[in-house]
Amino acid sequence: MTHRILLLPGDHIGPEIVAEAERLLRALSADFGLDAELEYAHLGGCAVDAEGDPFPATTRRLAESADAILLGAVGGPQWDDRPRDQRPETGLLKIRSTLGLFANLRPAMLFPELAAASSLRPDVVAGLDILIVRELVGGIYFGQPRGLRTRDDGVREGFNTLVYGADEIERIGHAAFQAAARRGGRLCSVDKANVLESSELWRGVMTDLAARYPQVELSHMYVDNAAMQLVRDPNQFDVIVTGNLFGDVLSDCAAMLTGSIGMLPSASLDDGGRGLYEPVHGSAPDIAGRGLANPLATLLSVAMMLRHSLDEAALADRVEQAVARVLADGYRTADLATDPARAADTRTMGQAVVNAL
Amino acid sequence: MTHRILLLPGDHIGPEIVAEAERLLRALSADFGLDAELEYAHLGGCAVDAEGDPFPATTRRLAESADAILLGAVGGPQWDDRPRDQRPETGLLKIRSTLGLFANLRPAMLFPELAAASSLRPDVVAGLDILIVRELVGGIYFGQPRGLRTRDDGVREGFNTLVYGADEIERIGHAAFQAAARRGGRLCSVDKANVLESSELWRGVMTDLAARYPQVELSHMYVDNAAMQLVRDPNQFDVIVTGNLFGDVLSDCAAMLTGSIGMLPSASLDDGGRGLYEPVHGSAPDIAGRGLANPLATLLSVAMMLRHSLDEAALADRVEQAVARVLADGYRTADLATDPARAADTRTMGQAVVNAL
Ligand SMILES: CC(C)[C@H](C(=O)O)[C@@H](O)C(=O)O
Ligand SMILES: CC(C)[C@H](C(=O)O)[C@@H](O)C(=O)O
């Protein structure tokens, strides 16, 4: 069966790193039996420029019929002053929500070869391997009512609603318990239940779910303490599950701990196996167009796609092993190189992974 | 003029550390001319146990007539299952809100003697000295409507409201710009304006205020990026200003970076100079009653009180110098000691600071 893969290069370095993903996918098709058909569409700032909408109808149609989606990165300063409905981020939020991609998996792992890039002491980050499961289509990102208004006393105010239904919490809870069962068997649910009613419900639902996963040990932590514990001793965690906003903050914090932020992939899944895959890093306007971007997070996102959406676990392993090989062989893009003058450019790195397959 | 100081020992290690603050205040009165009258009241779990309310009316009366308040710490597992209005944290939120303590100042600084306690590489945290200014009586902590309800389809949901008026943002903005003007002249405002309307207003108000503080350089950062940048290179910051929830998370993260969390004081100020002062750390049920608690964060909170509420800057300097002296002399409580068996207990440390005055 032919897999239909939609590529969304996005903005700035996005097209450069997605070009390497395409190179990888074509090699997997030519030499390793992957049966894939690649399509392209606009998302984010490039979609605003080309079609006046950060998530155009054409992109939506292609996304809805694809088996999996690979995104480069969206955003850039040239769109910052646009009204909210014409910002790149709005396109990202809309594709997540429209496709029901509620389960955002963000692994934060240390690549041993790159340990020196972490700002943490080597003994604190050694062997780091955490998975953050973030709820992605609910909470304060999407809650109604929201907006700007003028109070009766003439003062402007801005307001947003943080709301979670028990059904939304259960859905992400199941995804997280299942992920923990496949890994180290420990799940830490992060909330602010000492202050927020929405978190009180979150904690209650997670506690109830735990009875159905006797092989997983559930704990709870307040979000402020979780931020501290990530810095103090990240290795205490296996899987973390949390809401959309807390997950946004904690996953970036955890990714940075590893020092390997140019290396980390992510998956955003619906309840049927369809997913959007993207590197954790952003669109890096400062280095765009110069061949400096590290394509490995994108190539590892392809591996996640092969595993989670295309049922091609053997190919996923092959890609991950190829990435490990090129690192072991000493290939480094500028973000990782100790001597940037001798760094590999985006293409060289992408081709090295293909050669190592 | 006699300063009326209200002491709120609170729960678990609270009474032990506040006893050392009392020792310090009595020494300042006896030998250094401080004219202070000390009063005591209940807040938190002890108030629930003694008076059935985490912020009893007697405490409120004394707090409203005091010139300054010193809090030990509140909370503990024995109150975790109480209804929300009988939890220790509710007492803390109520005293903040009732007294209008909107400006929460949380310095995060590295004590050079303790650099080895940080989980960050020494070169990353060397000289670290950040001030986080957190809005403390608004935002999602207090926004209405909030609660738990059953939807029409029978599903439970929990909801909270994140709301900021321009007047609240201006008020905390002024406090932060003034703090930055007294320090390194750089202010970073942290929000999530790419997603939240409340943050859009926040960013706009901060930008407008900047015109009135030409000596301060204002920048903006999204909260997820701020969490990353704190880990990557905390020294890039001088003063950070942010809302209640983001400030809760980022200030704990920043405090932990220093490795000196047992050392860090905080102030929560109203617009007239009254303040509540407390250590950044919690009530530490696990070590309560054993003389293991580090009183230095509480003693440094007394120094902040002398400076910000009692107009006794010279005495504040004296306390801070005494703390520096005992550290230089090698005194360490168990949390800081390389050889815990030889650590100073709470009292020994408190007395050492008094001796060093
Ligand atoms: C760009 C932004 C809307 C987005 C988010 O907040 O979810 C990003 O920070 C992320 O984490 O994918
Ligand atoms: C105990 C809790 C309610 C409180 C808060 O969230 O403000 C604490 O975490 C703090 O930061 O002072």
Image: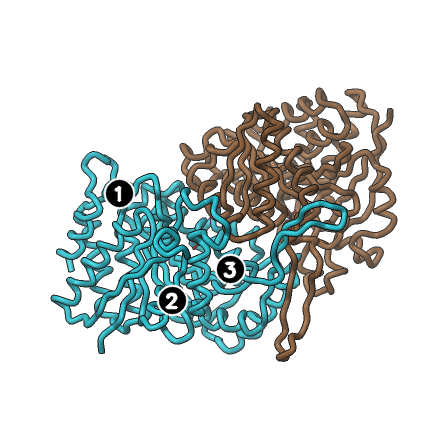
Chain colours: A cyan, B brown
Measure the alpha-carbon separation of dots 1 and 3.
32 Å
- The 10 Å Cα crowd at callout 2, few under 14, some 14 to 19, many 20 or more, is some
Q: Dividing the picture into quarters, in which one does residue B101 lie?
A: top right
Q: In the rendered structure, which disc, 1 or 3, sits on the residue that comes first in sequence? A: 3
Q: Secondary structure at mark 3?
A: helix
Q: Is residue B26 left or right of residue B162?
A: right
Image quarter of the C terminus of chain A: bottom left
The subunit carrying tag 3 is A
Labels 2, 1: one chain: yes
Q: Quadrant of ligand 1?
A: bottom left
Give the number of marks.
3
Residue A136, given in percent of the width and then of the height, sits at 47, 63
Looking at the rendered structure, which numbered label has been put on residue A289? Answer: 1
Measure the alpha-carbon separation of dots 2 and 1.
27 Å
Q: Is residue B214 visible?
A: yes
Q: Dividing the picture into quarters, in which one does residue A24 lie?
A: bottom left
Q: Secondary structure at mark 1?
A: loop
Q: In the rendered structure, which disc, 3 or 2, sits on the residue that comes first in sequence? A: 2
Q: Which residue is mark 2?
A: A60
Labels 3, 2: one chain: yes
